[in-house]
Image (cartoon, rainbow, N blue to C red):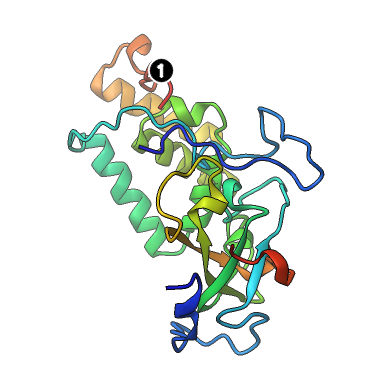
Amino acid sequence: MKFGASATASPSTYTPAPNHRFNVGDRVVVKRSFPPGHRRTPYYIRGKRGVIERICGAFPNPEELAYGFDGQPRRVLYRVRFPQRHVWQQYDGPARDVIEMEIYEHWLEPASDQAGGE
Amino acid sequence: MYAILKPDETRSDGERMSDKPINKGPHDMGGEPAGAIDTTDHGMKFWEKQANALRSTLGAKKIVRLDELRRAAEDLGELYYKLAYFERTTMALRTMLLEKGVITEPELHAKMDEVRARFDVPQAASKPVQKSGHR
């Protein structure tokens, strides 16, 4: 199965996310940004390219909740699929292996077409 | 099996990131060498049950949030690795209760002195247990 092919499945939405920027199947790149503070995006995935697997919903921003604020406006959360070989330089498992991670919209940018998911 | 794998740290400009990544929290250990995993069930000590119950109650009453407790734990820095799980979460709870003004430092110390006196614990043995080694 081609990487990202299951993105044609209907999106599973846990909570409404009316104003989502990305759609299922969109190629995205995680921001290569290293701000201080409580951040919900693991270090090793920053700068990596993946494909939107589903839209999980919109939730109060945990990066604001962590400091006592109300987390509004809500942020759209996506499940993003990354090829393991893209994420880990020395990955020696099958090329079809992926890692899926839930990432908030403000950590994602549209990816250019040439290098979306190998 | 992949414990020694390093994330691809080659930047778009061809530079390598430094050995000490900027603003990387102690909790953010994905891809780092893990070592052996201790799968022994150590159970919960009495104080751990009490601390956990207090944390759950304060969370349920929305006095502290999980996100705040996580942030306070991450801010422990190097201490994060030296503390056991419930010591970490209890330190985080302490930070949040002080930060929110639910308790004050003098009140906390007065109460700790009172509890110590109740159990007649020698001062030297009453410091939090610090594990040797990394994690």
Against B81, residue A4 (above or below) is below
Q: Residues within 10 Å of mark 1 (few under 14, many from 20)?
A: few
Residue B95 shows in the view: no
Residue identified by numbered label 1? B133
Q: Tell me which residue sits at (31%, 21%) in the image.
A: B117
Label 1: chain? Answer: B
Left or right of residue B88, residue A115 in this image: right
Q: Is residue B33 visible?
A: yes
Residue A39: percent from left, percent from top: 61, 53
Amino acid type, residue under disc 1 in the picture: Gly
Q: Quadrant of residue A22?
A: bottom right
B79 vs A67: above or below: above
Q: Position of residue A58 (x, y in %)?
A: 56, 78
Residue plotted at (61% across, 50% down):
A38
Q: In the rendered image of this protein, does residue B33 appear above or below residue A44?
A: above
Q: Secondary structure at mark 1?
A: loop
In the picture, the quarter occupied by the C terminus of chain A is: bottom right
Q: Residue at x 40, y 56 (%)?
A: B58
Q: Position of residue B51 (x, y in %)?
A: 32, 42
The answer to which of B96 and A12 lies nearer the viewer is A12
Q: Residue at x 26, y 24 (%)?
A: B118
| Rendered position, A98 above or below B14 | below
Residue A68 horizontal/vertical position (percent):
61, 59
The quadrant in which the N terminus of chain A is found is bottom left
Observer-nearest of A67 and A85: A85
Q: Is residue A34 left or right of residue B120?
A: right
* Residue placed furthest toward the right: B13
Give the image quarter of residue B135: top left
